[in-house]
Image (cartoon, rainbow, N blue to C red):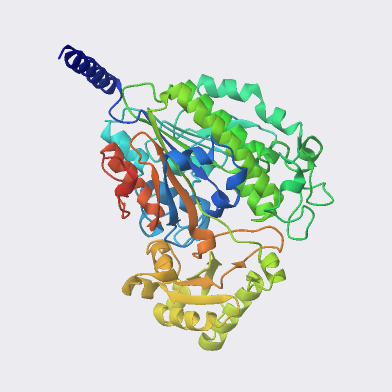
Amino acid sequence: MKFKFLFNLVYLFIFLGSLEQAAQQPKQSKLIIGIVIDQMRYDYLTKFADRYGKEGFNRILKDGFSLENAHYNYIPTYTAVGHSSIYTGTTPSEHGIISNDWYDKFLKKSIYCVDDATYKTVGNNGNYGQKSPKRLFTSTITDQLHLAQNMRGKTIGISIKDRSAILPAGHTANAAYWYDGDDNNTWITSTFYMNELPKWVQEFNADNKADEYLNTSWETLYDIKSYTNSRVDDNIFEEKLNGQKAPTFPKKLKELRVKNGNFDLIKTVPAGNTFTADFAKAAIIGEKLGKSEYTDFLTLSFSSTDYIGHKYGVSAIETEDTYLRLDKDLADFFQFLDKQVGRNNYTLFLTADHAAVHAPSYLQSLKIPAHYLNMTTFKKFVLKTTKEYFNSIELIENISNYQIFLNKEKLENLGLDVNTVAQKLADEVVNYPEIYKAVTARTLQTAHFSSGILNALQNGYNQKLSGDVLMIPNPATLIRGRKGTSHGSGYSYDTHVPVIFYGKGINQGSSSKRYNITDIAPTIANLLKIEAPNGTNGVVIDDVLKK
């Protein structure tokens, strides 16, 4: 009886201790981190799995929740569009970022997604800071967190690319920082956010880490013979750095930087990712993220993977080596978060803004259907069509992003109906060898495609901004030279990306069910118990969240 009493007493103390410990734990995460890896295909997780360490990708795969069949559900799959869709929970049809650059039919010129001449550069005397998120029509999850906390807590956006820092951080961000290379070598921002760089940014710039990273050579992390997941080092499908005789290792950066934009070269080597992580760590310390009573949000995008991917392609040793090194950068960053913020005090998600196709020239060498579209020749075909059917070569205002913009003023002067001309063009361009499908804006406004690639095209169509005829190329078709690769389509090689949730409030597990990239924002909103972004049409992924 006495033993039973003592046992119950000990159990009571343990129980009360656990209650006290639970009471000391924050109710929700003190810091949310959104990590976007530019141009990361899902199969980079599986293809290099046995080469990754335990504390990088494999840590969050093991202890977090992985969506193995997550896709982008719109066209085009470009950087600005991807980052916007992740953080707004909707597609270009609603958020308005329809490409990186697009033809503005009101201004009658091509525009860049975050350019804004009403603001000035903060950090140097150049013009690269004249930016803002004004073209993003809807709110972001970062905006919603600020609104829910009555503008308390901090939101910071970080990326080497301006658009990848600005758009995720939203309209209410405390700051967004991007890198101005060339001969400037400074992390900068815009007067949209502030009038002077914080002291910690000034100190980071003064440290000149980029110079340290570039005064070396890029050599493979491991014996080059061990890179059996990739093509041989010297091949005809890869671009080379200016000054190189072949696209091979080692790449003597100290010598090559002079002919490759000086500090811009860091964008195109794995050290660019390390450099970005260094800046993110400095931001967490300098801004005391995760240390207040409110929840902070850090948006972090790694861009060097995209620059390297474009130059060398999906199957290059350079690409494999970049991901092996990024795995180490992530391991170091996660351990930093454990120490600085606390292992049970933060939640993160990791995804990509798009994936990429194998170089069509490489696929052709394997007898897999693949194509290159010559835009000069295609434009001549379109003008020939308008001449043949409407006796004019002045009906086309612009052709870009696989869209045709008609000259409405000229059509009206000639007494031509916009919809008639657009439909005739759609009927004719679909016969062009590299064009697979073509539909008019009117079709996308009046019909509903519930699935398939035309559904993706419809989700990417914005009635206010898009063209009059929208086209889809054949699978594995690019508009570029035969070396390196790109992205932008609605095919699975561009849409299938990793989505991993990890940290406080996240279940352990995985799912092979198909989800859309637009499901991330409402899921994070549900985790934080706040309103989702105002254009959201994604769903909450219940399996991800602990209840």
Give the quadrant of residue 5: top left
Q: Nearer the viewer, residue 260 or 118?
A: 260
Could you say where residue 78 lies in the image, as x and y percent from the top left? 52, 55
Q: Nearer the viewer, residue 11 or 7?
A: 7
View extreme (left): residue: 1
Question: Residue at the spot x=32%, y=46% of the render?
Answer: 523
User: In the visual, does 2 lie left or right of 117?
Assistant: left
Residue 132 visible (yes or no): no
Q: Is residue 147 above or below residue 113?
A: above
User: In the visual, does 91 lie left or right of 47?
Assistant: left
Question: Residue at the spot x=49%, y=76% of the render?
Answer: 437
View extreme (right): residue: 245
Could you say where residue 326 lies in the image, as x and y percent from the top left? 60, 39
Q: Nearer the viewer, residue 64 or 102?
A: 64
Could you say where residue 6 lies in the image, as x and y percent from the top left? 20, 13
Could you say where residue 539 lies in the image, as x and y percent from the top left? 30, 53
Q: Is residue 499 above or below residue 125?
A: below
